[in-house]
Every structure is written in structure tokens, then in C-alpha cells.
Image: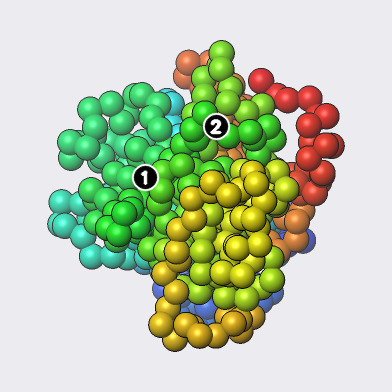
Amino acid sequence: YGIIRWIGMLPERTEMMAGIELEEEVGVNDGIFRGERYFVCPSKRAIFVKLSSCRPDSRFQSLSPNHSERMPNEEEWHMEGRLETVPPVTTEQVDRILIGQMKGIQGHCNSCYMDAALFSLFSCTSVLDSMLFKSTEPKDSSIQKTLLHNIVNPLRSNGFVEGRHIMKLRQQLQKLGYSRSFTTDEKDPEEFLTIIMNQILALEPLLKISVGGKEQECYSYQIFLDQKHNLVLPSVQQLLEHSFLSEGIKLAEVPSCLILQMPRFGKKFKMFEKIVPSLELDITELLSEGPQQCMLCGNLAQEECTDCFNDVLFSQTGFKLFCETCSAQVHTHPQRRSHQRSPLDVPEGYLGHRSPNALARDKLDLFAVLCIETSHYVSFIKHGPSSHDWIFFDSMADRQGESEGFNIPEVRACPEVGAYLEMSPFQLAAQDPRD
């Protein structure tokens, strides 16, 4: 006798398998199969068998005519706290755990904004796992438990989350008064994430922005552009730099996670036909503190010129920072003599030194892109170091049945993303845009 702790496919097995925690030490391991952990239990208590071979425990059948009511289901195991934290899916595990139909998070009743956001943030990265364990108010603890035990852990261990668990989360959010329409309406992913991180879990803001010497905090950043830009096929790096420059802001510190919202547009107006995701964001020059390098000679920068930022003679990315010598030379040109330069805050320890000693650059790696396809949220996730390690997730890729049917989520390998990102701007511009 035992309890089913895991259901799924195993390597070199053609049938659905079940991992069982036995009542006695008559098993063969502690939840590991061929070096891969599928669940956790005491030593010699685990065994893997065909799911079709499992039967309800006869000792409990007399208690109810409906045997399934007596069998602990997945949700009961989770809420009893029997499942421990599951690490994110690794590159080596993606094909086995995530790829295929009925994989990912099952969509239901306009849940795609939530499905895509949660899959992006938790399937293959642990960058926001702290929010799953942070102490919270008693009234909100059930939401945190649902998020961890009913959504994140099953997603990472089995590669699939039933739509009922997402609906349960939406019902909890609505019941606690965070929104009257969480169970029915489609919402902005940013709105959902802000409610979860700020109002429920009181997570420390991910971003600290310096504005006029004062700090502001937020959970994501909306990119805004003024009308002076000359961007045609911009990268995210360019958009972020232009937005920071136009708003006169800097990062007060390096963020642990940077959630960016691209310039908004509707069906009839698009600010850009295409935006190129930057696999790596160099935020060194976006920081308000710390030493900077002169863009020309590499010595310690002491001045910044915002007017030079749009000068076509300079590089298309990066703020225009100069040492005093290079700044004087650059601004001897008649067209630059009227430029307004501003001094940089150079740390005291660097004053008097010519070079900031091979300054280490602060960079952030892209791990997910959440976007809209025909009024429906989908996501692309980078799961490994290779430029082609991309997967595509759609919580409503297909459907079985009509009004009484259900949506079929799908995760598929999408290496072509890497191919697109390796194209030159000229090649990308020649590609046919999708509506």
C-alpha cells in the first residue's frame, strides 16, 4: 500500500507511470529514477509502476461509494505540505518535462495573461522564488500556498498545471477584494503581478530608480519615448536608454529582476513594426552611482552629454560619457559647442585616477518575452545558455469540445527565435511582420 506522489512519463517508458510512496520500507529508493529526482520520501519507500496497475486502497472503499473521493488527490497532497520545493526545469529536463501538448498551464476563461506570466517567471528560473516563501499576512497565506503548491511545484515537476488551479487563484484574489472581475475578465499581466508582489506578498520592490536625487520604487518599468527619437528598428537596449534619458532617471542599484513593458500601441497604430529583444542588457551607464568609462579613450569618465546621445556619428547604444580631455575635443566641433554637458558623480576612491581599472560591466540576461498574439497572451522562454535554447508557450493552443470542452495548452521548442536574434538589422527589416 502507498500514496501516489508523482504521475508522468519516464525515460524509455511508453506508458504513463506513477511514483508511489509506500507505507513500509519495501521500495527501492527515495523518489529518484536513473539519477533524476521526481519526488521526495524516506529511503526505501519509493517505487515506480505503471499507472494502469494502480488500484484504490480497498481498506477505504467501504467508506464511500465513490472511491475517488477517498484517494488523496494532487491538491490534497500539496495543501498537506507533503511536497517540498521543486527547482526550476533545467535545459536538460525541458524536452522530458515541458515539451508537448497538455503541457504548461491550462488556460480557462480569459486566464492567458496569468498563465503566460506565471509560466515565464517560474518554469525555468528561480529569480522570483523568494516571493513564494516570504512571510505574509494570514489572510493572504492561502494565495501564497496555492501559488507554490498548486501551480509552481506541479509545473516544475510534471510540466503541467490544470486550469482549475489557476481559477482557484483567481477566485482567491477576487474573494479577498483585489478585483471584482479576476475570474472572468482578461487583465494586464503587470496589474496581476503588482497585486501579487505588492499588495499580497509585500515583496520589496524590484526596481529602485533615482529621479532628481530622490529614490522611487516600483515592480516594473514602462518604457516611454518622446517624439524626438529617430528609432526605426530598435532593440530593447536602445528603447530603455532613450526612455531613461527622456525621463531624466537612473537606476539607484542593480535590480535582481528587471520587468520591462514595451511602448504601448493598438491595432491601428504601432509605434514600431518590430522590436528586437536584447539577449543581454548592459545597464552600467544607467546606474546613478559608480565609476564610468570614457566612451572614446576608456579613462575615467567625468562628464555626460545628453545632446551627443542622438549624434549619428556615435554608436547607436550607450550614454555618451567622456573624460574631461575627450569632452573638450568632441565639443570643439561647431555643431556641438552649444551642447549642455553635466558632471558625473565620481566615487571619491576613483578621483585622481585616469582609468577605472578595467571596469566590470553590469549586465542582465533575458529569460522571457511575454507578448500578445491576436489579442491573446503567449510567451517565449529562454531555458539555457545557447542562443537557440528557446521554448514557446500557449495556454490555449488548441481546444477539445465546444462549450463543455477544455483548452489544450502546448509548449514547443522554438530555436528559430535564436536565428532571428542573430540577424542583422537589415535582414530583420526585410522579414514580413506578423499582425
SS at mark 1 in the image: helix
Disc 1 versus disc 2: nearer the observer: 2
Q: CA distance from mark 1 to mark 2?
A: 32 Å
Q: Quadrant of residue 187?
A: top left
Task: Looking at the picture, tell me which residue is in the foreground, 261 or 94.
Answer: 261
Which residue is rendered at x = 73% and y = 48% of the image? 313
Please give left or right for residue 50 compared with residue 225 in the image.
right
Does any portion of residue 224 appear in the rendered image?
Answer: yes
**Which residue type carries mark 2?**
Lys
Q: Quadrant of residue 399?
A: top right
Q: How is the image coloured?
A: rainbow
Residue 340 % position (x, y): 48, 50
Q: Give above or below for 147 relative to 192.
A: below
Q: Give above or below for 210 relative to 236.
A: below
Which residue is rendered at x = 42% and y = 56% of the image? 250
Residue 183 % position (x, y): 32, 29
Q: Which residue is mark 2?
A: 228
**Which residue type carries mark 1?**
Leu
Which residue is rendered at x = 77% and y = 53% of the image? 388
Q: Which residue is mark 1?
A: 193
Does any portion of residue 365 appear in the rendered image?
Answer: no
Task: Looking at the picture, tell me which residue is in the foreground, 324 or 260.
Answer: 324
Categorize mark 1 by other alpha carbons within 10 Å: few (<14), some (14-19), many (20+).
some
- The quarter of the picture where the N terminus appears is bottom left
Do the CB atoms of the residues marked 1 and 2 lie less than 8 Å apart?
no
SS at mark 2 in the image: loop
Q: Give above or below for 315 relative to 358.
A: above
Task: Looking at the picture, tell me which residue is in the foreground, 72 or 112.
Answer: 112
Which residue is rendered at x = 41% and y = 69% of the image? 345
Residue 221 % position (x, y): 42, 46
